[in-house]
Amino acid sequence: MPPTGIPQFQRLFRAAASLDVDKDDLKRYDDFVDGKIHDLLLIGQAHAKANARDVIQPHDLPVTKGLQECVHEFRRLDEAIDVESLLERLAKHPPLDLAVAEETEGRLPELAGGLTVALARAFKLIDTKLKNPHTEHWERVTRVFDLLL
């Protein structure tokens, strides 16, 4: 799981968007972050190939202005992302054609944090009164991110 534990996961969602999440939300959250990081790497791979490089560099990742702002907000929240478990889950995906630069790999936890902030805030955009996301909220928010990332 990206946060170091359930309390950190809950604290991060509370700080980012005043949402109450529980351990049942953790699997959906893990799947979301894992999938979006993999998507970013796939596009990064395409950018690296288009530029005739065999390593995915940080500038190859499609980080939008909004995602970058969420990364900055995540840093301000001062939460930690468990790098090892994130990388272990990414390793379970089909292998990429290109290597991932060490600098790029080092950036993934902050991107996961930025995605978490963006995810929490997206729940509030979909339903401003939402306090505890349910399956239908997770499905809607995931579909929105699938359209954009």
Image (cartoon, helix red, strand yellow):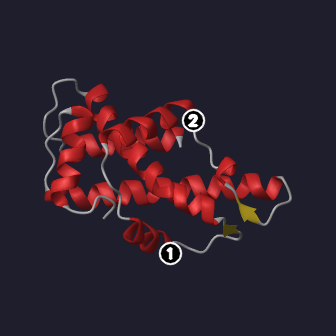
> Front-most of 23 and 139?
23
Residue 13 percent coordinates (x, y): 23, 42
Identity of the residue drawn at 56% across and 63% down: 105
Q: On the picture, is 37 further left or further right than 24?
A: right
> Front-most of 1 and 133?
1
Query: In terms of image quadrants, where is residue 85?
Result: bottom left
Residue 115 percent coordinates (x, y): 41, 45
Which amino acid lies under the numbered mark 2 shown in the image of this protein?
Answer: Thr
Q: On the picture, is 124 further left or further right than 92?
A: left
Residue at image mark 2:
64
Residue 63 percent coordinates (x, y): 58, 41
> Front-most of 141 and 124?
124
Q: Do the residues labelled 2 and 1 touch (CB within 8 Å)?
A: no
Tag 1, which secondary structure? Answer: helix
Identity of the residue drawn at 42% across and 43% down: 114
Classify 10 Å Cα crowding around label 1: few (below 14), some (14-19), many (20 and above).
few
Which amino acid lies under the numbered mark 1 shown in the image of this protein?
Answer: Ala
Residue at image mark 1:
91
Residue 131 percent coordinates (x, y): 13, 34
**Label 2 to label 1, Cα distance in Å?**
24 Å
5 relative to 93, above or below = above
